[in-house]
Image (cartoon, grey):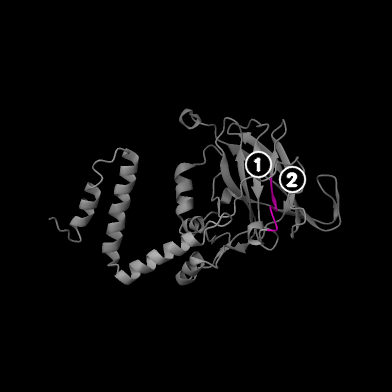
Amino acid sequence: MPEFDEKSITAAVIARMSECKDARFKQVMTSLITHLHDFVREVRLTEEEWMQAIQFLTETGQACTDRRQEFILLSDTLGVSILVITLNHPAENGTAESTVLGPFYWEGAPELPRGSNLAEGVKGEPTFYSGRVLSADGRPLPDAVLDIWSGDGEGNYDMQLGEEVGMKARGKIRTDEQGRYWFRSIRPTFYPVPTDGPVGRMLRKMGRHPYRPGHIHMIVSAPGHASVTTHLFVAGSEYLDSDAVFGMKESLVARFDRHEPGVAPTGERMTTPFYTVEYDFRLRPLTTSAAA
């Protein structure tokens, strides 16, 4: 009967996949097993530490609900999400850069007319967003969709405010024939990622802060083009240089101009100060392989 020492066990585990028919799966698992075993050997992992790791992953799964994805948060805070995004969605020829989806995306946001107030009844400083969706070569893209979401002016997402709240500060806007979009929401502020679960405990143990700079999320898509999951970051926001999920991209930092009470770009009269921000998104064309 074969016996394995700390070196031979790795090759033995990999050899058990000799009948695997999925070449890509075999490649990924071979690399995973190799690096995992090397990690255990390198740090001389103790049984107690391994059980703590298993308990941590168990609690991470138990913290997941239909409104909270603790594993995405774990991936984000370890820099894995942005690494995968950077490898798979390179920005080319000035096209919009991708960044993390985050744990608060909610499918099924309502489609609203251009100019709508996505943040009706939401705390925060009113902000009017506008710009264009363009192809890489600068052609306007009509009927492009911006799937938009953000927290409120205190950094709280609707998912964090109780099931009775429903969707807030979310909506889908389509561009017009000239590729233009415009809508109203709020000026995002910095906020902490959820820290009441296992990922929060991990961050505290690491000596790390949990904050993200102020940003609004968008998934921008158009027929014949690669969709992009991205943000607009507020220029001058705290934590731009130390985003807890490593998602900040300089090309996505936008200027939010402050205006005194008066007539907004939509024609409505504002009785409080408000902000405007303008940003154009350029999308990469779909490749033949991606379109298939």
Q: Quadrant of the N terminus?
A: bottom left
The amino acid type of the residue labelled 2 equals: Phe
In the image, which disc is placed on residue 183?
2
Residue position marked by numbered label 1 in the rendering? 146
Give the secondary structure at mark 2.
strand
Tell whether 77 sits left or right of 33.
right
The amino acid type of the residue labelled 1 equals: Leu
Give the secondary structure at mark 1.
strand
Q: Which residues are magenta?
A: 164-171
Residue 142 coordinates in the image, percent (x, y) = 68, 31
Q: Are marks 2 and 1 in contact (CB under 8 Å)?
A: yes
Q: Nearer the viewer, residue 179 or 154?
A: 154
- Density class for disc 1 (Cα within 10 Å; few <14, some 14-19, many ≥20) is many
Residue 132 coordinates in the image, percent (x, y) = 68, 38
Q: Nearer the viewer, residue 64 or 190?
A: 64
Quadrant in the rendering for residue 67: bottom right
Q: Which circle's residue, 2 or 1, is located before the other in the chain?
A: 1
